[in-house]
Amino acid sequence: MKMALRACLRTKPGLTALLSQLSCSGHAAARRAPALVAQRSSSSTSQKIKVDFDQSSGVAVMHMQSPPVNSLSLEFLTDVCIALEKLEMDKSCRGLVVTSSQPKVFSAGLDILDMYGKSPEHCAEFWKAVQEMWLKFYGSNMITIAAVNGSSPAGGCLLSMTCDYRIMADNPRYSIGLNETKLGIVAPFWFKDTMVNTVGHRATEMALQLGLLYSPAEALKIGLVDQLVHEDQVLTTATETMTKWLAIPGILNISYTCHFFHLWCCNLVCTICSCVCQVIAAKKIHLSQDF
Ligand SMILES: CCC/C=C/C(=O)SCCNC(=O)CCNC(=O)[C@H](O)C(C)(C)COP(=O)([O-])OP(=O)([O-])OC[C@H]1O[C@@H](n2cnc3c(N)ncnc32)[C@H](O)[C@@H]1OP(=O)([O-])[O-]
């Protein structure tokens, strides 16, 4: 399925360029990849990601373990993408649960320290990695469930929204949402689109304009998460829920179709934006030459 997705995307110029640029191999090749061993139950670990794969159920659990708050740095994003790609290539892996090993936090979002005062080359690599994570999760042909066992602002919320289902710890001290506006930054359009797909247009408009962070109860109310459970039961509920999803015939195809459609729409928008930018740039060059 993944290969089919890529083959289809290859026919579309915008995302083709994006995918080829975003391929893990470029910035990730030199990094140590978590290995997936084909046995009944296996565990693989990179520095920041631990993957437990139960071959009998076909379900893998990805533990994010990047202290203190699983902030999404270039290094961490690369590890996530490599781990995901390995699972994707293993046809016996049909479901993926993503969770955090850090207390109180699922992910604090993009690593602010990795965005500030860095070289343009680093920033380009960083943003490629962010987009790659988004594309890989959203375009995955596995069933993906986010076991949100702590706060999940900004990019952490995005990560959870790329999954098919979200289970959050019912602890009022935790929060989730796209709070970029409150930080004085604009959430990229594909953050916005992902939220629209999750909670609808109006809720997204409110969330982004006000930079809202929701308590678990509020998040459940607007559909930002699908289920609340006691903190100790987030992971077990996620694996139980996964069993139900995987028992539905053809579910992978349904999931694939939905995600593919979204990616196709994004591709279309990317292509249009790219054309508009090129026209504007060409006009600016023309005007400056006139002067
Ligand atoms: C461009 C548009 C798109 C942008 C998308 C984004 O995701 S933008 C991102 C938007 N993200 C946010 O707005 C989230 C901001 N973070 C929070 O709200 C809280 O940290 C928390 C609720 C995640 C955890 O609360 P808690 O009480 O459990 O933990 P704590 O608060 O005590 O922090 C512990 C340590 O982690 C550090 N650190 C934290 N976050 C980040 C980060 N993103 N990066 C790097 N580091 C971060 C923090 O400085 C501290 O370091 P120190 O001093 O020990 O060296």
Image: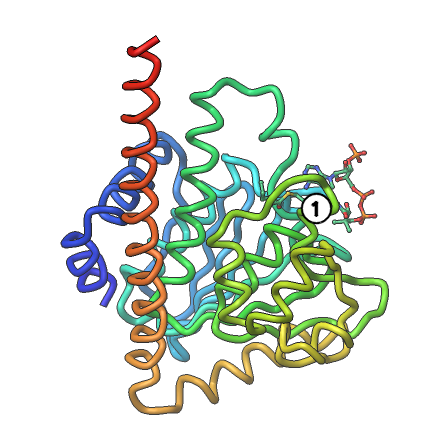
Q: Quadrant of the N terminus?
A: bottom left
Query: Foreground residue, 229 or 16?
Result: 16
- Where residue 162 sits: x, y (%)? 48, 63
Task: Tell me the residue at 30%/26% (across/down).
Answer: 283
- Asked whether, in this view, residue 102 is left or right of residue 54, the answer is right
Q: Could you say which quadrant of the image residue 269 lies in?
A: bottom left
Element at label 1: loop
131 vs 28: above or below: below
Residue at the image point whose x is 57% and y is 43% from the top: 72
Residue placed under numbered mark 1 in the picture: 69
- Residue at image coords 77%, 57%: 104
Graded by Cα atoms within 10 Å as few (under 14), some (14 to 19) or many (20 or more), the crowding at tag 1 reads many
Image quadrant assignment for residue 31: top left
198 to 121, vertically: above or below: below
Within 8 Å of ligand 1, the CB of disc 1? yes
Residue most extreme to the front? 290
Task: Locate residue 254 relative to residue 222 in the image: left or right.
Answer: left
Q: Position of residue 176 (x, y in %)?
A: 70, 61
Taking the image as drawn, is residue 101 in sight? Answer: no
Tell me what residue is drawn at x 61 percent, y 71 percent: 202
Residue 20 visible, this angle = yes
Q: Inspect the image, locate mark 1, and give the three-letter code of the amino acid beneath it.
A: Val
Figure quadrant of the C terminus: top left
| Residue 276 placement (x, y as % from top left) | 32, 41
* Residue placed most toward the observer, 36 or 276: 276
Q: Quadrant of ligand 1?
A: top right
